[in-house]
Amino acid sequence: MSEEKHLNFIEEIIKEDLESGKYSSIVTRFPPEPNGYLHIGHAKSICLNFGLAQKFGGYTNLRFDDTNPVTEDVEYVDSIKEDIKWLGFQWQNELYASDYFNILYSFAVELIKKNLAYVDDLTPDEIAASKGTPTEPGKDSPNRNRSIEENLRLFEEMRDGKYGDGAKVLRAKIDMASMNMHMRDPIMYRIKKAAHHRTGDAWNIYPMYDFAHGQSDSIEKVTHSICTLEFIPHRELYDWFIDKLEIFPSHQYEFARLNLTYTVMSKRKLLQLVQDKYVESWDDPRMPTLSAMRRRGYTPEAIRDFCDRIGVAKRENLIDVGLLEFCVREHLNKVALRRMVVFDPLKVVITNYPDSMEVEMLTGEDNPEDAESDSREIPFGKELYIEQEDFMENPPKKYFRLFPGGMVRLKHAYIIKCEEVIKDENGNIKELHCTYIPESKSGSDTSGIHVKGTLHWVAVQNAVTAEIRLYDRLFKVENPGSEEGDFKDYINMDSLQIVKTVYAEPALKNAKFNERYQFLRKGYFTLDAKETYNRLVFNRTVTLKDTWAKESKKVQPIS
């Protein structure tokens, strides 16, 4: 086992447990509820649970916490499995809390027989009112002292469907004066006559999370049940059920959940964004879901790196989304294929280019960061497109792009000089007439001319067209969930800008969904898997630099 890095507090616990002989190996689990899509916060939990098992020689179960049939769906089950695999992990066993409905029911019967659970007729509002406050004890239910026999009968009748939703619940008999509100006779089962996505109509009652979770861990002999900090108050109840049932002593450990700037992590709020059409779907590239990040072009390597960098803490904190974007840039710089794409074209005519050479094939490396990467052919001709912003008729000092009489290098090609500006009848620039230096060809330049500016370009004759979607942060404020009023009031209405037609070098005609691209001086992009059935559509994954930083206005360099 590697000790190269300082162990986090959970790793220290596991190391001690293994060295003391408490466990011979460890078992962790990732237990999502299939009621929505996984987001970047879940990625931290996935990386932690699977990473611990890998590091210490154990294994991880994927267990779906499917105890609420009303909100759960097979669609979410499938998306969760896809996301975990995409992140690079594989579970040992695919399990469901519903696998244990029979044994959980028998556990509940056992607690009734021990006089540690009872059937209550109080309504949810009455139960809530009787719970008391953190400084005042609660009041016993009038049904708390029902006989064991009556409770067994009523609980069986609940299971058989004799009563309607909400008519009765099964509660643990613990302590209505406990300082921990979760210990004040918590509900174990409720009546819910709804079809379950796996068990159909077999059950009329469903266990609550607090009853199903710890017992499911115990059944699977999970050694280290890792939850987020909001479950600290639940730990006492987790231990109580396991102790009273005298089953395998799984134990719960808590870590700080991931909170990210300029986004929200609540499934309820994310669902609102989808339902209210602020985004198009759960995988809209502006969403923090893993499926959205995959569609946007984030890589699993970058997300794992991000989770590793933020570490495992005991206190809640707000992580700057810029760190996630930094990790994405770091990885994409290593793997992205370089391509030239012109967003806002200005035509350039090379007046001294031989008419006999309609197309000249130049060579460009796919990725200068990868010594083993391939190269590609780039057609060059008499007519080219450059960016409108790369020409200025009356430039300021130290302007290194193109201007009348000025010279620049075209990436992978030649040095050109602007000789004449052609305008239309309204005085608008129509095109530039330039000359090129034949001896200045990239890779074999013998011209002796040195220029400071390098521009990307596309040959007019060979250009392919595409649509570009420029995604930005969905919210205008760092912590929209904590601001006053409706969190949706802080949505960035400019978070998506669409450029309907851009001009790209022909190598992009064969773009693949699993490839990542750096459009020179523009950013990192990926082919949109949803929109490419009749045209090329690229999503911007991330800019080349942090455009929210002070230096964001600077021109992006060629790489």
Image (spheres, rainbow, N blue to C red):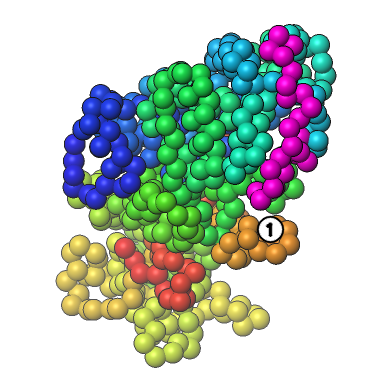
Quadrant of the rendering where the C terminus is positioned: bottom left
* Residue 134 lies in the magenta stretch: yes
Q: Position of residue 62 (x, y in %)?
A: 45, 26
Main secondary structure along the magenta-highlighted residues: loop
Residue underneath mark 1:
487
The one of 397 and 44 positioned closer to us in this rendering = 44
Residue 82 seen in the current view? no
- Which picture quadrant has residue 137? top right
Residue 474: horizontal and vertical position, in percent? 60, 57
Quadrant position of the N terminus in the picture: top left
Magenta region, residue range: 127-150
**What amino acid does circle 1 point to?**
Phe
Indicate left or right for 50 with 117 as reference.
Answer: left
Residue at point 57% right, 55% down? Answer: 263
- For the residue labelled by badge 1, is the local secondary structure a helix, a strand or a loop? helix
Front residue of 27 and 244? 244
Q: How many marks do you count on the picture?
A: 1
Q: Is residue 428 placed above or below 281 in the rendered structure?
A: below
Does residue 321 sit above or below 216 in this rendering?
below
Query: Could you say which is closer to the camera, residue 33 or residue 457?
Result: 33
